[in-house]
Image (tube, rainbow, N blue to C red):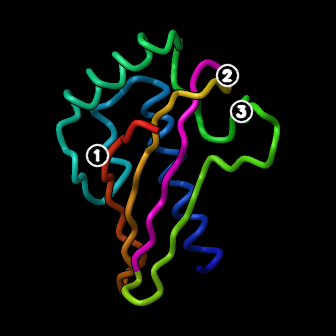
Amino acid sequence: MTEQEMEQITQVVKDLLHAFHERKYEELSSCVDEMEWADTDEIGEIMDLNLEAKELDFFDEYGIPCKFHPAYEYHQMHIYEHTDDGEILVDYDMTGSGGEMADLVLQLKFQRKESGLHSTFLCIDPA
């Protein structure tokens, strides 16, 4: 993976997390090239219910350290590169209220194209 591809992936994740943080779910589709799960009203309802159920005030922006315990090396973003078909899958463990585990995984797919990476919002999966 090139440095430019990593920067693009990180920017898409940042943009999506900002929309989640601001609860502007209608803006999710402007953060990616394609939405596999395109019903932003449904996404918003589910995400707000998750905040309430987990007693979180908000979802965190990108870069807020996770307060994961026990204290061992923990990574919030996992990247799986498929060299045979040019596909890159990204899982990002979401947090809320300043680093608390939200038990939700943002799942994205990136496909290498001649014009660059094509981003697809797949889903939010329970962790």
Q: Residue at x 64, y 24 (%)?
A: 100
Image spot of residue 36 (x, y percent):
22, 53
Residue bearing mark 3: 68
Q: Residue at x 32, y 46 (%)?
A: 123
Residue bearing mark 1: 29
Which segment did they paint magenta? Answer: 87-98
Most frequent secondary structure within the magenta stretch: strand
Q: Which residue is drawn at 27% across and 31% down?
A: 43
Q: Look at discs 1 and 2 and give the one toward the viewer.
A: 2
Does the stretch in magenta take in 90?
Answer: yes
Circle 1: residue type: Ser
Would you place residue 74 above or below residue 101 in this image? below
Front-most of 44 and 18? Answer: 44
Element class at badge 1 = helix
Image spot of residue 122 (x, y percent):
31, 53
Q: Look at discs 3 and 1 and give the one toward the viewer.
A: 3
Picture quadrant of residue 39: top left
Crowding at label 2, few (<14), some or many (≥20) Cα neighbours within 10 Å? some
Would you place residue 30 above or below residue 111 in this image? above
Image spot of residue 16 (x, y percent):
44, 42
- Left or right? Give the position of 48 relative to 18: left
Front-most of 113 and 82? Answer: 82
Query: Of callouts 1 and 2, which one flags the residue occurring earlier in the amino acid sequence?
Result: 1
Query: Of callouts 2 and 3, which one flags the residue occurring earlier in the amino acid sequence?
Result: 3
Circle 3: residue type: Phe
Q: Residue at x 60, y 64 (%)?
A: 7
